[in-house]
Amino acid sequence: MIGDRSEKDCRKLWDRIPEEYKQCCTFSDFWEAYEKVFPKETHRSAGKESGETNHVERWNNTCRQSNARYVRKTLSFSKSDFYHELVTRLYIVRYNLKLSLAI
């Protein structure tokens, strides 16, 4: 989901999550928009010290380290959301393909 951390964009994110995943337990930081949108029965707010957000934090760091588009507006920055999403999807496919070939 491309957007800021507003409640509106958080609702867009929630709407794009497949129904079968909406039943799973979710973790996020203490951002107010997440607490308003994600169901209280399955959502937990957690600080970094808890370790509950380690996987997503590691993924974000891996993306930033591997692709200058995630760092700041540089020569390789995508000027449109369409291309930013396209490059992100390509990166995910290549990343997963590399992992599957390594096994």
Image (cartoon, helix red, strand yellow):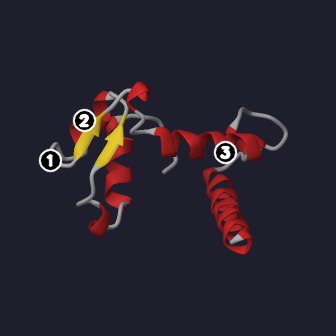
Q: Describe the element under mark 3 as helix, strand or loop.
A: helix
Q: Which amino acid does label 3 sit on?
A: Thr
Q: Is residue 99 left or right of residue 45?
A: right
Measured Cα–Cα span from mark 2 to mark 1 = 11 Å
Element carrying mark 1: loop
**Amino acid on which the number 1 mark rests in the picture:** Glu
Residue 20's x, y, as percent?
28, 69
Amino acid bearing label 2 = Glu
Query: Which badge, 2 or 1, comes first in the chain's sequence?
Result: 2
The residue that mark 2 highlights is: 35
Q: Which of pointers 3 and 1 lies earlier in the amino acid sequence?
A: 1
- Residue 95 at x, y = what percent? 69, 62
Q: In which quarter of the image is residue 15?
A: bottom left
- Where in the figure is residue 27, as x and y percent of width and height? 34, 42
Q: In this view, does 41 lie above or below 73?
A: below
Which disc number belongs to residue 41?
Answer: 1
